[in-house]
Amino acid sequence: MSNCVNLKMNYFELFELMPAPRVDPSGLQSRYFELQRKYHPDHFTDATEEDQQEALQMSSVVNQAYKTLKSPELTLAYFLGTCGMMQEDEKYSLPNDFLMEMMELNELAEENPAQLASEAGNTIQKLETEANIILSKVGKETLYEQDLVALKEYYFKKKYLKRILERNED
């Protein structure tokens, strides 16, 4: 994971975690409360205006970091971003065979909406099984660029599937 770069305020460093595509949620909430106690603006009422402003900014960063790290999808996207593998609001081109499969799911949504959830669930399960093979390496082996590319593709495929399911719920 040596290809990961440090950002101005790295969420993993802030929460004293090893950069990884998944975060163990145990201890995350207690670290969040620790950081909030340290940076909460109410603790800086007697400080200079500059220190108050810095505390307000840090409190905001802590909130955003916690929101990111407690969500598996956001954590994965953030991790890939720290590794230079993903840009904010990136438009990713999914493979044609996957897009063809999604066209079939969209048609199924029109013909048989009840079956869509089952079919999409099966596809998500298959994607997660493939991703878990890579994720099982974390902490034991180095993730190589092809692993990061595969995780990125997993992220965008799952996001696409979730959009189809959300549209079907409306």
Image: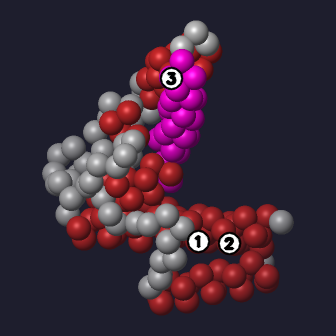
Question: Could you tell me residue 5's position as x and y percent?
Answer: 27, 54
Q: Mark 1 — residue?
A: 160
Pinpoint residue 10: horizontal percent, then vertical percent. 37, 43
Q: CA distance from mark 2 to mark 1?
A: 7 Å
Q: Position of residue 165 (x, y in %)?
A: 69, 67
Query: In the rendered structure, are the residues bearing label 3 and label 2 in contact, judged by CB atoms less than 8 Å apart?
Result: no
Q: Give the class, few, some or many, for how many residues have Cα within 10 Å of label 3's Cα (few <14, many ≥20).
A: some
Could you say whether the residue bearing mark 2 is in a helix, strand or loop?
helix
Residue type for callout 1: Tyr
Q: Position of residue 157 (x, y in %)?
A: 50, 71
Q: Residue furthest right?
A: 170
Identify which residue is drawn at 79% across, 83% down.
Answer: 111
Q: Is residue 10 above or below residue 3?
A: above
Which of the pair 65/22 is nearer the observer? 65
Q: Is residue 55 visible?
A: no
Q: Is residue 52 left or right of residue 83?
A: right
Front residue of 13/120: it is 13
Q: Nearer the viewer, mark 3 or mark 2?
A: 3
Q: Amino acid at mark 3?
A: Asp
Give the residue at mark 2: 164
Q: Residue at x 32, y 70 (%)?
A: 149
Magenta residues, as a range? 48-73
Distance of label 3 from label 2 (alpha carbons): 46 Å
Residue at the (25%, 70%) spot, across then down? 146
Q: Residue at x 37, y 46 (%)?
A: 8
